Image (tube, rainbow, N blue to C red):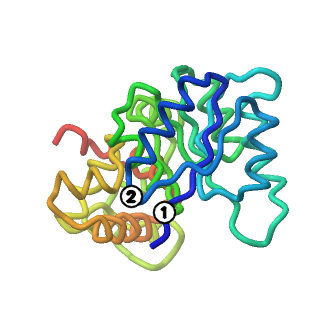
Amino acid sequence: MRPIRVLVADDQELVRTALRIMLDRRADLRVVGEASDGEQAVAAAFELRPDVVLMDVRMPGMTGVEATERIVEGWPYEEPRPRVLVLTTFDLDEYVHACLRAGASGFILKNVSPDQLADAIRVVAAGEATLAPSVTNRLIDTFAALPPALVERSPSPGTGPEDRAGPLDALTRRELEVLVLVARGLSNAQIARSLDLSEAGVKSRVNRILTRLGLENRVQAAILAREAGLLGR
């Protein structure tokens, strides 16, 4: 398999250099370019066509949020556009919401370990989303608005939209364990290590959980898990 091609966008040269060294040490990751502001990030993304853009939020001129939106909305090629993973020191709700609205696939903080950063890049490159645990928890608090039918037993499966969501007891014990770890903000790779499963097995279970519960993404799954009281387990 070819390595995941990464574009690093950050206004600090020291940070860019450190990220390049850190990521290039991994056989499945390769930094193919750097950008020091949002305009350079957009131009480099269009020229280099990376798999993932590692994007800072606060940069001179065009911000990372605007650059993300331009890459996502203005991608000029037929091939899949890059996935944008925001990496920042600013754990602020306004940045989180703006980046997600702009089309970012993930939002993590610069205090993560090198292994956690590498895992997050792999997650978004695979077409999934990832959020820092603190961000996930705040999004849960902000957007916890799922209908009660998602956590109640449905007496007549298959008769309407709520029934397609399915009750939690439609999940196996292992799927419930995976759901709890998703709700705690763990990536598929971290869940695999925690439960001694393959990463492919975790991905399959996550997809099955979302399908059985009629959910769109991991954030909705986290909201459901909290509303159902699973995080006390």
Q: Position of residue 53 (x, y in %)?
A: 62, 47
Is 15 left, or right, of 43 in this rendering?
left
Residue 227 in view of the camera:
no
Give coordinates of residue 142: x percent, y percent: 52, 31
Q: Which quadrant would the N terminus be assigned to in this image? A: bottom left
Q: Label 2 crowding class (10 Å Cα cut-off): few <14, some 14-19, many 20+?
A: few
- Image-quadrant location for residue 61: top right
The residue under the point 34% across, 56% down is 188
Q: CA distance from mark 2 to mark 1?
A: 7 Å
Query: Image quarter for residue 106?
Result: top right
Identity of the residue drawn at 42% across and 39% down? 22
Vertical side of 99 occupied by 49: above or below: below
Residue for point 43% across, 50% down:
148
Say above or below: 4 vs 159. above
Q: What amino acid is labelled 1 in the image?
A: Pro
- When asked about the image quadrant of residue 28, the answer is bottom left
Image position of 35 (left or right of 196) = right
User: Residue 4 at what x, y percent from top left?
Assistant: 51, 59
Measured from the top left, where is residue 104 in percent x and y?
63, 45
Q: Who comes first in sequence, dot 2 or dot 1?
A: 1
Q: Are marks 2 and 1 in contact (CB under 8 Å)?
A: yes
What residue occupies the far bottom of the structure in this picture?
A: 158
Q: Amino acid at mark 2?
A: Ala
Badge 1 marks a residue whose secondary structure is loop
Q: Quadrant of the C terminus?
A: top left
Q: Which residue is mark 2?
A: 27
Along the line of sight, the residue nearer the viewer: 112 or 91? 112
Image point 61% across, 25% down: which residue?
13
| Disc 1 target residue | 3
Number of numbered discs on residues: 2
